[in-house]
Amino acid sequence: MSKLDELLVDVAALVESGRSNQMSLTVVAGGAVITGRLAPEAVWRQRVSEVLADSARLNDFSAVFTTATQEEGRPTHLHFHLARILQGAVGIPETGGMYRVAIEDISAWTVGDFSYSDH
């Protein structure tokens, strides 16, 4: 997008201000369809940090997510948790992942998450 979608920025700002993780959203970014729930950046960072801390190989990266400072002002990224990249009838990963997507890279979006079935 050459110009940020201000409505999407407003949605992201509301998620940030309310510390809520109940807003479901589906976006198209770089041709990928990502669906899941939005989380405030601080909550997202904490969860990623916890996952990394539990890993024997990746625990050194955990601190990057707890010490990084958040930018002031309007949100520039969406932070998904319990999210999946949809490909055909499959969601990757099955259990949901943690994705950070730049708002400027989103070409389409809708409220709600898409369910899928392999039946």
Image (cartoon, grey):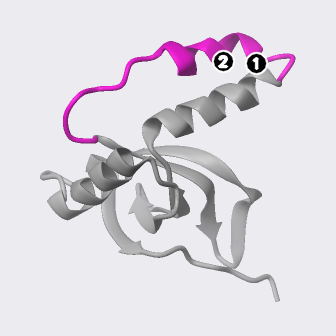
Q: x, y (%) of residue 7?
A: 20, 63
Quarter that holds the C terminus: bottom right
Q: x, y (%) of residue 99?
A: 55, 46
Magenta segment includes 21: no
User: Which numbered disc covers residue 74?
Assistant: none
Disc 2 to disc 1, how far (Cα)? 7 Å
Quarter that holds the N terminus: bottom left
Q: Is residue 27 left or right of residue 59?
A: left
Give the answer, above or below, for where 86 lies relative to 45. below
User: Residue sitting at 65 percent across and 15 percent down?
Assistant: 61
- The reply to whether residue 83 is visible in this rendering is yes
Outermost residue toward the bottom?
119
Q: Is residue 74 left or right of residue 42?
A: left
Q: x, y (%) of residue 53?
A: 76, 21
Q: Is residue 22 left or right of residue 116?
A: left
User: Residue sitting at 30 percent across and 59 percent down?
Assistant: 11
Give the answer, above or below, for where 68 lies relative to 73. above
Residue 6 occupies quadrant: bottom left
Q: Nearer the viewer, residue 104 or 77?
A: 77
User: Which numbered disc covers residue 58?
Assistant: 1
The secondary structure type at the circle numbered 1 is loop
Residue 88 occupies quadrant: bottom right
Q: x, y (%) of residue 66?
A: 55, 19
- Disc 1 residue type (three-letter): Leu
Magenta residues, start to end: 55-75
Q: Residues within 10 Å of mark 2 (few under 14, many from 20)?
A: many
Q: Which residue is mark 2?
A: 62
Foreground tag (2 vs 1): 2
